[in-house]
């Protein structure tokens, strides 16, 4: 699934992907592999990213915008 992780990181916090990796306490190579869609973050890491960036799931994965009520239910269930 294509993501907007790099764009969301800049837009919501003004951070680089490297800084996001530091905040997640993960190797920057891991986060860059997500950005370039080589691998996907776990659900747990997506939630951490959303909390750090103060954004919604669909801000990172725009394909889910049309299903935003479903994504909101996932967030609410986790909190």
Image (cartoon, grey):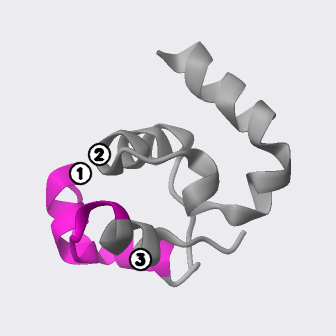
User: Foreground: 16 or 26?
Assistant: 16
| First in sequence: mark 1 vs mark 3 | 3
Q: Main secondary structure of the magenta part?
A: helix
State the SS at label 2: helix
Quick check: is 63 in the magenta stretch?
no
Residue at position x 69%, y 64% in the image = 62
Q: Is residue 23 left or right of residue 8?
A: left
Marks 1,2: beta carbons within 8 A: yes
Residue 52 tag number: 2
Q: What is the crowding at mark 1: few (fewer than 14 residues within 10 Å), some, or many (at least 20)?
A: some
Q: At x 47% / y 15%, what residue is drawn?
A: 79
Mark 1 residue element? helix
* Between 36 and 63, the one nearer to me in the picture: 63
* Magenta span includes 20: yes
Residue range of the region highlighted in magenta in the rendering: 12-35
Q: Secondary structure at mark 3?
A: helix
Marks 1 and 2, Cα distance to the nearest angstrom? Answer: 8 Å
Measured Cα–Cα span from mark 1 to mark 3:
14 Å
For mark 3, what is the residue?
Answer: 6
Specify the quadrant that holds the N terminus.
Answer: bottom right
Residue 63 in which image quadrant: bottom right
Disc 3 crowd, CA 10 A, few/some/many (<14, 14-19, 20+) = some
Q: Is residue 54 visible?
A: yes
| Residue 71, image quadrant | top right
Q: Residue at x 20, y 75 (%)?
A: 18
Question: According to the image, label 1 marks what residue?
Answer: 24
Give the x, y percent position of residue 36: 51, 84
Badge number at residue 46: none
Label whose residue precedes the other's in the sequence (1 or 2)? 1
- Horizontal and vertical percent position of residue 67: 83, 44
């Amino acid at each position: 699934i294509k993501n907007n992780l790099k764009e969301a990181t800049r837009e919501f916090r003004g951070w680089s992907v490297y800084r996001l990796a530091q905040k997640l306490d993960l190797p920057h190579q891991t986060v860059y592999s997500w950005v370039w869609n080589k691998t996907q973050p776990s659900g747990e890491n997506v939630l951490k990213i959303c909390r750090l960036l103060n954004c919604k799931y669909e801000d990172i994965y725009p394909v889910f915008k049309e299903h935003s009520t479903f994504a909101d239910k996932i967030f609410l269930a986790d909190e």
